[in-house]
Amino acid sequence: MVVVDRARNVSQLGEVDDLDEEPGEVIESAPPLRVGQERELNNSGLKKRLLHKGIGWETPDFGDEVTVHYVGTLLDGGTFDSTRDRNEPSTFTLGRGEVVDGLDQGIITMTQEEIALFTVPPHLGYGEAGRQGVPPNSVVQFQVQLISWITVVDVCKDGGIIKKILEKGNRNVQPGDLDELLVKYKVKLVDDTIVAQAPEEGIEFYMKDGQFCPAMPKAIKTMKSGEKVKLIVQPQYAFGDVGRDAENEFPLIPPSSVLIIDLELVSFKPVIDVTGDSKVFKKILVEGADTIAANEGATVTVRYTAKLEDGTIFEEKGFDGENPLQFITDEEQVISGLDQAVATMTKGERSIVTIHPEYGYGSIEVKRDISIVPPSSIIIYEVEMLDFVKEKAPWEMSEQEKIETAGRKKEEGNLLFKSGKYQRARKKYDKVAPCLISLKLCFFGIHVL
């Protein structure tokens, strides 16, 4: 089989589009081919003539699964192979030796729906052996229409999980180990027996907890929200030589089974380890309007509902006509876990913040507005960042503001130092020097932008 697409003549695939420029295929810094133009590819002896420009700029790569129409001819015009004659396009994987090298190398320069004529020298074609209808050492031509392709990814680089991308995702962000996922999937054996399936609405789980088999989270880490894929999973990433017993209404999975998984990453909610010690987690429900976070020293305005793990609400701010809470971050005006989490939020962001006692109310009982927080409680805040104003940088201040800020930060640092809060004192002292340096530069007529 020589999967190559070429019509007997140009009229079979559509007329040549005069003077249209090909949108893709840039070779060795050369300008893109124009329709009707021919060029040798990479000094290999392989020549490409553009007959019809394609769609967009993306091109397939080695390992991808392409679907093409092709017609292969000798230089005298005699046809030796044609998908057009069979009235069925051909699908194959690039770079796997399923077609002659000249076709592999040519197709990776094509965009979707492009039509091109490739002139293939013997060393990239059928060589000294030839084939039926092709004499030894023949130069051959393939007219190819690239219909579509599926991007194929070897997830673990060992052939154990092959991912075929059926539909691309809608964001250029992939989930992390802590994120909460919503996925849909259907799992089959190679004989099409269905052995597992998610509910119609999908199933939610955390990446770190895994789902169904080891292949699932490994593949999902490479996916984007909205992406649909087909996985071919070897036993070592499925259920190995043990298999799986029948489960619910689904039959058993025999030992050493290869699984075929249709998988969709419907969406995911990013989860951030705010403090780096797994004691304060922030799960983003709604992302903010921009990427600028409040950071330390900002005056923030938030509203929230605070609960215990059992759902008991112990405090609310900013609802039912009550004013939202306003505070300055990194000033110990609220509990540490809430303070640090809010400092990472952007305007309009809504998140769930889970706080362990070390960053909450510790080992004491605390009475809040609505109910009591028992000792050593894990507490949960659903927080919305309504607005914030970041602390002015020295170059944004007037001379008088710089003097006042330097003096205030020094005094605040002294008080913190005396109370044994050395780390927070250092942060205050660190903000004194930039004000004084900026003030000194202004004194000498040097303006910092």
Image: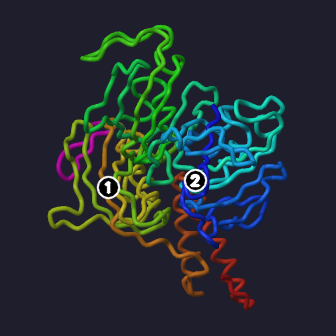
Q: Is residue 149 positioned above or below 298 on the image?
A: above
Q: Quadrant of the N terminus?
A: top right
* First reached walking from the N terminus: tag 2 or tag 1: 1
Residue 186: numbered disc:
none
Q: Quadrant of the C terminus?
A: bottom right
Give the amino acid type for the residue marked by disc 1 in the picture.
Val
Residue tagged 2: 422
Magenta stretch encompasses residue 365: yes
- Report the front residue among 393 and 121: 121
Instruction: Where is residue 345? Give x, y as percent.
Output: 42, 59
Residue visible at 16% across and 67% down? 321
Instruction: Where is residue 291? Give x, y as percent.
Output: 48, 63
Image depth: mark 2 or mark 1 in front: 1
Residue tagged 1: 383
**In the shown orientation, is residue 375 left or right of residue 283?**
left
Residue 176 shows up from this direction? no
Give the amino acid type for the residue marked by disc 2 in the picture.
Tyr
Question: Which residue in the rendered view is the most extreme toward the left?
Answer: 320
| Magenta segment main secondary structure | loop
Instruction: Where is residue 370? Give x, y as percent.
Output: 17, 50
Q: Which residues are magenta?
A: 364-375
Instruction: Where is residue 51? Give x, y as percent.
Output: 63, 61
Corner quadrant of residue 360: top left
**In the shown orientation, is residue 343 left or right of residue 3?**
left
Q: Secondary structure at mark 2?
A: helix
- Report the front residue among 406 and 111: 111
